[in-house]
C-alpha cells in the first residue's frame, strides 16, 4: 500500500526548460555580483570555501571563483555547493518577482488531491532543499509548499545511487515499499526500485512511453496509479 509520494522536479513536476532557460542563466548572470556582495556572510562563505578548496583557488581570486561557478552551471554540474549558492541567488529573483516557477498544468490539482487523500508528499531533487522550497512557494499555480512534508537533495546522496533512496525511506520513517517515486529519468527509477520503492516513469510530451518500459510509464500526473 502506497502511503508516500516522492517526486522529482525537472521533467516531472516542472519543465526542464524553466530550469535550463530561466533559473540557470539567472544564476549565471548574477553570480559575480552575489559573491562580491555576500561572500563574507557565513552561510555563503562556507560554500565558497568548498568551491575554492576543490578548484585550488586562492581566497582573493574572486574572478577565478566566479568563473569556476559559472563553468559548473554551464556543465550542469550536480555539486552541492553550487546548488546551495544558486538557491540563494534564485531567492532574490523570486522575491523581486523576476519570474514564477513553472509547474505542468495538472500538477497542482493532483498534488492537492493526493494530499487530501492522506498521502504524504516529499521532494527529491538535485537542486538544494532551499531552492526546492522556493520553487514550490512561487509557482505559477500559487504556493504549493504547504503540501509537502519534506524535501531531500544530493546531501542524502546521488539520485542514481540505491543507498540514497534507502536513506530517504529511513528518514521518512516508512518502509520503502510504501513509497512511490516519480521521475523522468530511468536510472533514478532503477535506483529507487533496487531500494524497494514503487516507481512511475513520467514521459511528458513530446516524448511517449516506450512499449518495453521497465517501469510503469505515464504522460502526466493524472495518469499515475497509486
Image (spheres, rainbow, N blue to C red):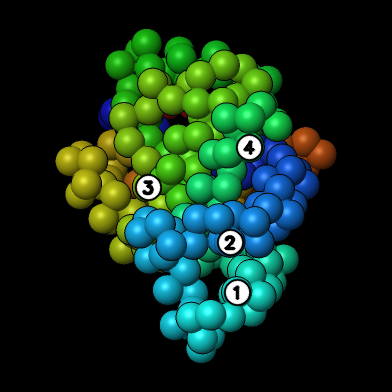
Q: Is residue 109 above or below residue 123?
A: above
Give x and y (percent) for residue 22.
74, 43
Answer yes or no: do the residues labelled 3 and 2 have beta carbons within 8 Å?
no
Quickly name the residue at label 1: 62
Quickly name the residue at label 2: 36
**Dot in front, 1 or 3:** 1
* Residue projecting furthest to the right: 206
Q: CA distance from mark 2 to mark 1?
A: 8 Å
Quickly name the residue at label 3: 152
Is 1 positioned to the left or the right of 97 in the image? left
**Which image quadrant: the N terminus?**
top left
Q: Residue at the location (29% across, 49% down)?
A: 168
Quarter-wise, where is residue 36 in the image? bottom right
Give x and y (percent) for residue 87.
52, 48
Asked whether residue 198 appears in the rendered view, the answer is no
Quickly name the residue at label 4: 93
Q: Residue at the location (20% across, 49% down)?
A: 170
Q: Is residue 87 above or below residue 96?
A: below
Amino acid at each position: 500500500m502506497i502511503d508516500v509520494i516522492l517526486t522529482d522536479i525537472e521533467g516531472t513536476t516542472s519543465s526542464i526548460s524553466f530550469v535550463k532557460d530561466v533559473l540557470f542563466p539567472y544564476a549565471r548572470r548574477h553570480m559575480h555580483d552575489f559573491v562580491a556582495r555576500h561572500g563574507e556572510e557565513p552561510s555563503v562563505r562556507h560554500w565558497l570555501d568548498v568551491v575554492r578548496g576543490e578548484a585550488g583557488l586562492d581566497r582573493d581570486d574572486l574572478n577565478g571563483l566566479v568563473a569556476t561557478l559559472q563553468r559548473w552551471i554551464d556543465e550542469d554540474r550536480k555539486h552541492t555547493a553550487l546548488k546551495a549558492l544558486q538557491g540563494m541567488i534564485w531567492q532574490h529573483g523570486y522575491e523581486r518577482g523576476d519570474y514564477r516557477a513553472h509547474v505542468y498544468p495538472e500538477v497542482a490539482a493532483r498534488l492537492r488531491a493526493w494530499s487530501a487523500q492522506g498521502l504524504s508528499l516529499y521532494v527529491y531533487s538535485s537542486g538544494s532543499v532551499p531552492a526546492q522550497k522556493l520553487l514550490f512557494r512561487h509557482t505559477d499555480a500559487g504556493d504549493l509548499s504547504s503540501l509537502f512534508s519534506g524535501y531531500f537533495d544530493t546531501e542524502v546522496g546521488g539520485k542514481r545511487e540505491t543507498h540514497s533512496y534507502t536513506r530517504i525511506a529511513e528518514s521518512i520513517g516508512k518502509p520503502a515499499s510504501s513509497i512511490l517515486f516519480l521521475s523522468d529519468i530511468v536510472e533514478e527509477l532503477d535506483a529507487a526500485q533496487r531500494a524497494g520503492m514503487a516507481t512511475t516513469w513520467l514521459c511528458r510530451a513530446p516524448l511517449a512511453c516506450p512499449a518495453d518500459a521497465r517501469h510503469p510509464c505515464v504522460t502526466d500526473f493524472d495518469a499515475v496509479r497509486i
